[in-house]
Structures are given as structure tokens and as C-alpha cells.
Amino acid sequence: MSVAETLAAVRPRSSRAVAFLVFAIAIALIAATPFLPNYYIRVIDSLLIYILLGIGLNIVIGYTGLLDLGFVAFYAVGAYSYALLASPQLDLHLPFLLILLVAACLGAITGILLGIPVLRLRGDYLAIVTLGFGEIVRIIINNLDWLTGGPKGIARLDKASILGIQIARPVDFFWLLLVVVLLAGLVAWRLERSILGKAWAAIREDQDAARGIGINTTNAKLAAFATSATIGSIAGAIFGASQRFVSPESFTLQESVLIVLMIVVGGIGNILGIVAGAAILILLPEVLREFAEWRILFLGLLMIFLIIVRPAGIVPRSFGPDKLIRRLIGK
Amino acid sequence: MLGNLIQQTVNALTIGSIYALIALGYTMVYGVLRMINFAHGEMFMLGAYVAFLVLSMLVGDVGMAGAIALTVAFLVAIFLVGFIGVGIERVAYKPLRNSTRLAPMLSSLGVSLSLVTGIQILAGPQPVAFPSFFPVVRYEVMGGTITSMQIGILVAAFVLMFGLYFLVNRSRIGIIVRAVSESRPTAQLLGINVNGAISMVFFVGPLLGAAGGILYASYYGIMSPSMGAVIGLKAFTAAILGGIGSIPGAMLGAFILAFVEVGGTALLPIVTHGVLGTEYRDVLTFAILILVLLVRPAGILGEAVSEESIVYKREF
Amino acid sequence: MRKFTATLLLGASLFAGPAMAEQTTIGLSAPLSGPQAYFGTTWHNGFKLYIDKLNAEGGVNGVTIAYEQEDDKADPREGTLVAQKFCDNAQVVLGLVNFNSGVAQSTLPIYEDCTLPTMTFGSNPSLTKQGYKFMVRPVANDLAGALLPAEYALGKLGAKTALIVNDKQVFGQGISEIFAKNFQDGGGKVLDTIAVAPSDVDFAAVLAQIKPKKPDVIYLGAVMPQLALFAKQMHEQGITATLIVPDGGYTPDFIKQAGEPNVQGALVAIQVPPMDASPAIADFAKLYKAKYGEDAGPYSIYGYVQGQILEQVLKTTKGLTREDINAALHAVKVKTAVGELEFDDTGELKVAPSYLYKVEGSAFQLVGSK
């Protein structure tokens, strides 16, 4: 009996236990987090921001099948929205929720702005154009010194607060991010199941056929870019508020690539996969911090290994949150 | 003015020919496997490091190396990197040949990360002085300055590119590679050794990349573990601009990119009256890339996309 | 539960151990991987060299010093995680942190919140102007670093015109703007400011632009290896202006990578005195080489000096709490390898030594100091 067969034989009986275990661990983690030292909470905040970014980018890459290498541009739009609207830079100090709204709108607009020129492009041409877009945004931010502070960035951002409750400590951001990640995950998951989601899937599987059966691929693609960019931009605004300093160094091409890697290593098109990918690519280097360069080497080799062993990601596309829940309640 | 023009033209040609050597590797791999090999920039970096290692084994003090030692180091390094390229393909890409298109690309990102960090650990992260392969003599041509280095690089790059041209278009190996590139399943049916052809591509691509790396390191006088990343991205851009998968396209794209960069540096501040300085050069480069792709979605010399999308519909 | 508490107490008493051998921990943060790893590592090595020496002598007043070294990858986000880690660790009473001003910008608010005093290495002048109470900067900031070369160019070289090139990074842009201002205030004329990308290696196109302008001096606000590449290509293109570069150029690599004939006469401004300037520094250079098997990095001496500052702080502090250390740090007055140092209210050095070197042959010749 091969390994796969053994696994297949074991799976049905243990799947409920696995689902239960996953849930138990998740809830235990969430419940324990506020009691951890601030450093761990900060690491978890960082992880949640990347999960949020992953959920956003996954809409374009995982659902619609378009390789976007410039996602970090939207992240930057959000972060700089917060930095400009809540700092001494322009002497504006708007409330956090309003800025989140502005960031979301700006994100959607930039998403569509990027979407329009790349509608005709496919595959690798799309990848390089989005990459170019990301670099253009970063270079412009780096050079508009009068507005963005240039390479110096913007420091001394306001402490965020929601309805009078200050969001400043790492644990505050943990709760905020948890809510936002769950919301974004829910939205993405519902979208995938909607008519729009089916259109995305059709584009991913076969663009010409999708057009053939009457799907408006232009609108569907633009919707994908806009939704994805909105989530990216919200992540950026929260990142800005939590770090209280933004500079162009945080929005390099490597960051875009990291998010793509997270999605692919974890399991493309699947929110649970993103969590797994983020855990490997964000948490692991943090745990191995003391090994400096060796951890990066290890990460590189691990990436090759994981992709060869599981080319479609650690968590398969079909094993979404719904499956997990269904298994838990035993259907 | 004329002197400046001549000088900038030679500058662009020199940079362009180095870009071209690397862009060829991207485009050839893409041709046979439809895969972007993100680790290709690292072949360029390895070329310089291996050559340096060979040199220091040959002569001890690298700064004192003579012409024979330099030639030996050059040849040993490019062939060695060629074999490394074949080895990487076997280990990291071959198991993924029938998987999604994204998988080998990301595997190559892993390879790239491992190679850069590996060299950083072995040789140190800081840049190292690299010996010059040609004596530097300055020539004044109508007010412009051209160095013997630039001429040497141009000649070496063109020799290598013509070598590749003959290999692909005139030799038996070339026919095999082109057949696989045209259609892998058909080539397989015809009894062509597809694995052999792919290995060949992964030998020649890194070999040219390594040659580019050595020329580059000796032209600029330094090498560093991260040198492949920047130049790799530029060469990749050039390959896409020219139409990825097309060998003449890669060369054309490389020279266009170099001329845009040099022209951008020279003209941006003048044309915009100082509103946009040289710091916007890369914005100009990417803007031109995007414009070209809007008009020709498959690059300047690339084939139409539709055929590719029929054969390789499922991208992810 | 009681058993658990008892075990805890036992453990605590074991750790508290003999009261004589007190220990205190210093948090070290800098890029230890990536392209800037060399600077971060060698800077920290200078500090460890001095600390190990102190510990071998039995510590300061019986207090031995431990350190926790972390990699911030020169990334503001990683920097905040490291900062939080140090903050959470009650053993850490002082941070020797952030090589990069950009990273310091994101970590200083965190250190301030947890009242952890830091010796910050980022040299951007704005860092000390934000009212942080728990930081000092034991190096000259860029204001001082760019004054001396401007005066030298105007006075000793008789330069009338300068051309500024910078890499559009925090350090390069900041310091070159200050140089330009000082040069203009002294009566010089800045012909043009040209930006290059930090990843650029080919300056031929830029140099062809500069050549017809015929500046007397070119100030290059950038870091290695761009400094060496620029110097080499500048000479190859036949430009004879005097090149002035900031502290990154103060390394033998600058001369080696550019090629000796290409950098003759180039000026390097740095906060570091010559390695043979005093017996203390010569001693340091020898110790460093003996311990690490290579020559000291450009900033190693400052790590060493920070060790000397720490020694004095431990000698004068009332206790080993963060507040006490912070008070002692701000009040410190100490003779170090680079001269006597003390801080003003903002945490800036009262007298920040800066030096100017000229490349002669394969060595740096001191031509001015301030």
C-alpha cells in the first residue's frame, strides 16, 4: 500500500479530529495572545497583516489566475494615506476610521488604474507590467519629497483610535487585525462563491471560453483588481498606524514577491493556505532570528523542497474553511 | 555635443550587450519550458564568483593575474556555471515539469534566495574588488571618451551572441532545441530527446549569463552577492520587451532598454526643464515597457499570445 | 499550585544566586544579513571586543555584561520586532541599536514607551529633534559630518563650484543636502544636483552630463560600493574634479575597488580618527585584528567607544534599572578612544569629532579635523 493510499484510508475517520484540532489550536492561540509578552503579540500582528495582504492578493492570483507582482503598491497607498492624513506632515489629524475608508477608496481607484492597462495582457507580460507598476509607485513615493518626505519617510504618525478607544498597544492592534482579517476572509470567501467568483474561476481556467459563454471578462477582472487593492490598502493603513512610521523601504519588490510566495507555498486560492504560508514565511524567520544569514538560506531551501513536494501548496485548493467547518459539525 | 552623443551611444551599447547576454538565458528557458527562471540572475553572479575563485587558485594574488590565467579562469567559470545550471534544473525544476506554471517559477525564487545567501555566507556580504580583464586605455573620439574596456566588452559580447546564433540556427543541437521550443509534445513524438534539449538550454543560458557576469565584474571592478538581482530584473525586463521566447527579441530588447536608460539619464532633466530629474529614469523605463506592451501585448518580436494560451491554458 | 510556586521561588533564588555576580544585558540590533551585514557585524564586533575585555577583568564594579544580538535586516518592520523583544526582556537595560536612521525612526517610539535607553547609531539629524528622552547618539550627526568637507573645499582647495550627486536614500540625500547648504553658505555655487538609483552601478551617462559643467568638486552622497564605482568611472571618463565622499568611503575597499590611480586626491569625511592617531586607537586596531582575524570595519571603533561609554555608565549609575541607566547615560562624561564625550539635553554629542582624509597612494592621509 502506498503512502497516499494509507493516508486516504486513514483520512475519513480522522478528518473530524483534524478539523477539531485546527479549530482548538486557533481558538487557544487567539485566547492566549493577549497574555503573551508584547514581542510575541507584535509578531502575531505582523503575521496578521501578511495574512490580510495574502487574502487580498489571492483574489487576483488565486481566484482570477492573474500573476500580480506589484501588489505592494496598494499596501503603500494605504500606509501613506494614513501617514499623510494623521501626522504633522500636512498637519492633518483625521480619525482612524475615516482614514481607513479613504484608504479603501484610494486602493480601489489605484487597483482599477492598474487594471485598465493590463486587461489585454496575459501571463508573464501581465506579471512584468504589474511589477513595473509597483516599482513606479515606489520610485514616485521616494522622489516626491515635498509630499511623502522622500526616502526619509514620514515619522511621528498619530496614535490611532476608534470611537474614543485608543489603538496603540500591540494587543489593541491584535484585536483590530483579528476582526479585519476575519471580515476580509469572509468577504473573500463569499465572493469566491458568488456569481462574480464563478466568473473569476472561469477566467482562470480559460479566458477565451469564459468570454465565449458571455462573461464580461473586463468587468470581472477590474472587480478582482479593485477588491484585491482595497484589502491591500486597508492592510497598509493599519500597518502605518501600528508602526507609526512609513518609508519607501517597506514597499519593495521583495515584499510583493514574499506575498506571492506565501500564497503559493501555503496553497493557492485558499484562505487556509494563506495562513499556512504566512506561518512558514513570516513566523519561521522570526523564530530563527538568531541564525541571521543561515535562516535565509534555510528558508530558500525549504521553499524549493515544499514546492517540489507539494507544487499546489500545503493546503489543497478544495480544502477551504467551509470544508473545515463541515467536518467539524460532522457532515 | 557630438562627442557627448558618441560617448553616450557607446555607453548604451556596452550596458546593452551585457543585458543581452543575460536576457538570452531568460528567453531560451522560456522558449522551451514557458517558465520565468528567477534564479538566472544568480548565474550571472556565480560566474563572477567562480572566475574569482579559479583566478585566486591559479595565481594566488588575484590583482596580479596575467592574460593566460584570466582566459583560463573565464573559460573554466562559464563552463562550470553551465553545469551548475543543468544541475539546478534537474533538482529544482524537473520534478515540477508537469505541475502548474507557477510552481517552477517559485522554485526558482527559492533557488535564487539560497544561492545569494549561500554566497553571502561563504564569501561575505560585502562587494569584492574584481581584476580588470583588459588594460584600461582612454580614447578621445571627437570630444567623447571611450575606454578599451568598453570596446573589449562589446567585442566579447558580440562574439558570444553570434556563437549562440550559429548554435541555434545552424547546428543539430539548435534544431533540436528549436523543435522542443516549438512544441514539446510533438518533439517528443518525433523521438527527440526532450530532456537533452532542456538540459542544453540550461547549460547554454547560464553559460552566457556567467560570461555576462564576468565581463560585468571586470568592467565595473567589483562583484557582490546581490549583483544578480538588479541586473537580472533588467535583463528580464529586456527579454519581455523584446518578446520573451524570441532570441533576436531578447537582444533587441536589451539594447532598447539600455538606450532608454542612458537617454533617460541624459534627456529627462532637459526635456522636463528639471521637473523630473534623473531619479525618474526607472519610471520612464517601466512606462515605456508598459506602453510597448499595450501596443504589442507579446513584446516587439514576440509571437501572438493566442497560440500560447491554447496550449497552456491553465496558468495556475 | 503551591508546589508550582515553590519551584518558581526556588528557581528564582537560584538565579539570583550570589549577589556579588550581578549581570546586566545589552540589546544589540543592526543588519546582520543582507548587503549591509558587514557594517552591522563589524560595528557590533567593536563593542563585543570591549565588553569581553571588561568581563575578563571581572566586569564593572562586579557587574558582568551580557549581550543579546539581533538582526534587524535594515528593515523598519523587523526593527520594531527586535525593539519589542528587548523591551519585553527585563534583563535588557540598554540598547545599542539601529545602524540605519530609517529603522531608528520606527523603533525609537517603542523604546521610549518602555523606557529603555538606547545609544542610537543612525546619523540623520532629525532623530534627536523629536524629544526622545531615552536616546543618546554617540556619533556625530550628518550636520557635523558635512561641514568640515565644505569648509575644506572652499578654503584649502579654493573651490568655487560644486556638483552634488546622491542616491536618494535617507543617508545619502540628507548628507549631500547639508553639504550643499554649507558650501553655498560659504560662498560656493552648486551647479546641479543629480540623483542616481541606489542599485546603479553604471554612472557613465551621469558622468557624461557632468563633464561639460566642469565643477571644481563633486560631492557624492551615497554608500559603498557606489562610491568606489563612481570614483573609478569618473576617472576613466577623464573628469578631474575633486571627489568628496561621506564616511562609507573610509575603508581600504574604497581604494581597492576603485583602483588606486582612480581615487588619488579624493576626500573622505568621517567621524573616526586615524587608526594611528593615538595609542588607544592603535591598541584597539591591534586587539580587533587579533580577535576577529581581519581589520576593523569602518564603524568598529564606535562599537568600542560605546563599550567605553557603557563602562563609565555602569561605574556612575545608581542602580541597574532602565531609569537609572538612562540618567547615568545622559550625564556621562568619559574619555574614550576618540576623545572626551558627553551629551547635551537632546542626547546629541556636545562636541562631535569629525575628520577629513585624503587618499594618497593606498592610504588615507588626515588633512583636517574638527
Image (cartoon, coloured by chain):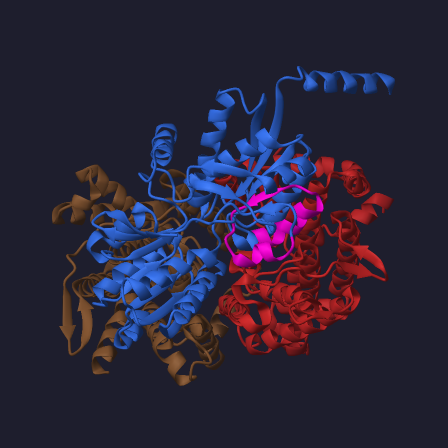
Image location (x, y in percent) of residue C152: 33, 61
Say which quarter of the image contains residue A5. Answer: top right
Residue A261 visible = no
The magenta stretch spans residue C109:
yes
The magenta stretch spans residue B218:
no
Disc count in the image? Answer: 0
Is A170 left or right of A250, judged from the image as shown? right
Image location (x, y in percent) of residue B19: 33, 64
Q: Which residues are magenta?
A: C104-131
Say which quarter of the image contains residue B145. Answer: bottom left
Is B1 left or right of A321, judged from the image as shown? left
Front one among C251 and B124: C251
Q: Colour of chain C?
A: blue
Residue C286 visible = yes
Q: Is residue A158 above or below residue C35?
A: below
**Residue drawn at (30%, 46%), measured in percent from left and top?**
C252
Q: Colour of chain B?
A: brown
Image location (x, y in percent) of residue C321: 68, 33
Is C105 left or right of B129, judged from the image as shown? right
Image location (x, y in percent) of residue A293: 48, 40
Q: Is residue C171 above or below residue C212?
A: above
Image quadrant in which the N terminus of chain A is located: top right
Say which quarter of the image contains residue A284. Answer: top right
Q: Which chain corresponds to the colour red? A: A
